Amino acid sequence: MREPALPAGATGRPLPDRGRQARPARAAERSAERRADASLEDGLFLLLLAELAFAPFWFGGNRPFAWMVNAVVWSGLILAYEAALTFKRRPYPVPPARLAPVLALMACVLAWILAQCSPLMPVGMHNPLWPLAAGALDMPVGGAISIDPDTTKLALLTLLPPAAAFWLALQLGRESRRARLAVLGFAGISAAYAAYAIFSLGWFPTRLLWVRKEYYLDSATGTFVNRNSYATYAGMGLLASLSALSSMIARIHDSAYSWKRWISLLLTRSAIVPGLLLCAVMLNGMALMLTGSRAGIASSLLGVIVYYLLHTCRKGFRWPQAVSLGAAALVILVVVLQYDDLVSQRLQAQGVLDAVRLAILRLGLTALGDQPLAGFGFGTFEESFRLYRDASLPGALLIDKAHNTYLEAALGLGLPAFALLMAALILLVALCVRGSLIRRKDEEIPLLAAAVSVTVGVHAMVDFSLQMQGVAVTYAMLLGVGASQSWPSEKPAADAARAAIRRPAGL
């Protein structure tokens, strides 16, 4: 039989598989897109670190100019990141659903602050001072829950930089490479500020940046006006340096097979970064002791203890951690023996708590008892405290902070909103603690966030360091990075799923 004729133009050869040829091209395009996205996110992350370095520079971030710069820069970073995700149609690295309870609680607190400064709230919820003001002026006066709505709005604006720092660190820090770089970057930044604090105390103790220093002439304050605020910052820097040093020693230990390998590492450029981190530990430790802050030093040491206790619960007490702990203990011991006179003199002269703080605490609790539910308005402590001030405080002493962040927040927000705020923070810290215990890699990052939370939280009981944007932005960044690394990586599961798809059926 004759074979059927082929169509015109046909050769009888198998046609090329155009789909198979197109796959490498599509894969190359996707790879190029991923590299472009990573470059954009890396650029935003570097800008985040640059803003983190600026945050404590302008007098600890506690000046209107610093508030304005921080608000503009952090808003720009947030908008740039959100626009990039929208344009690329990419999901968040950390889905908001994972933090739904925290975000819901914070949204409730934000809504309540907006309600406090709104004149549209029912008259029955307004602060009792507004009817008194209307009677004294003999004219109608628009009221609100807050006794000073403008101050409440300004205080709400100061929350934007820490909130933006947390969100960006949460999303950009999901990649472990960036998370480690964030810890290393802050360790270096804090060491630079510590070096400046030590140098300025020794060579020009009467100058604070470019102005005359009026307070704490015998204490290291860095670029902060208050030594207690800088003590919290130096304590966070000490913890970050210890964490980075401990994790680096552990990685070197895991890759080193003998003592000869260790010696070769220490004699090459591989020892440069651990050596710099050890210098950062020493600088932050010295600067911390030179502040003379009783609560700052105690809370920082408590954070170090919590860090190593959690690490021991996680992996047991291994000798790489013993080396870093021994180095930290030696540095702290030398610094304490060298500079303990400043702290001991303050303890002997003033005790653990001075009379002024105790009087402020007593009067603040009295004020909270008068407005326990609605509060006086977020950020209005100075205005509300004037109503309760008595002769137990010196008349010339300006009281604009409660020296207790919890009391000041409760007095401004009211107890229900304050409880929601604390619940959100506790959930985040608990997430970091859980992450430090279940992660098989980079567990030091959520562990650091938990330890820093202890330092900041304990010191907030007796001072207002967390109300300085230099401290608040830094803490928010560390907490965001720690939370982002609190979940196990999805890469193994994703790789297994892709392998199952490629695997022929029945094999």
Image (cartoon, rainbow, N blue to C red):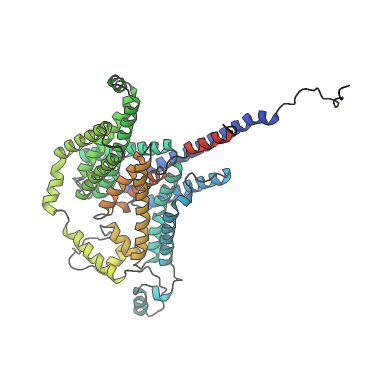
Decide which of 98, 112 is in the foreground and name it.
98
Single out the residue that lies furthest toward the left.
348
**Quadrant into which the C terminus falls:** top right
In-image side of 56 versus 484 (left or right): left
Q: In the figure, residue 142 lies in which quadrant?
A: bottom left
**Residue 345, how many percent across, how many down?**
12, 48
Classify 260 as above or below 91: above
Classify 76 as above or below 327: below
Decide which of 404, 316 is in the foreground and name it.
316
Q: Residue at x 55, y 35 (%)?
A: 500
In-image side of 55 versus 171 (left or right): left
**Residue 55, how many percent across, how many down?**
36, 46
Single out the residue that lies furthest toward the right.
2
**Residue 59, how many percent across, how many down?**
31, 48
**Residue 256, how many percent across, how many down?**
33, 24
- Could you tell me if residue 222 is visible in this image? no
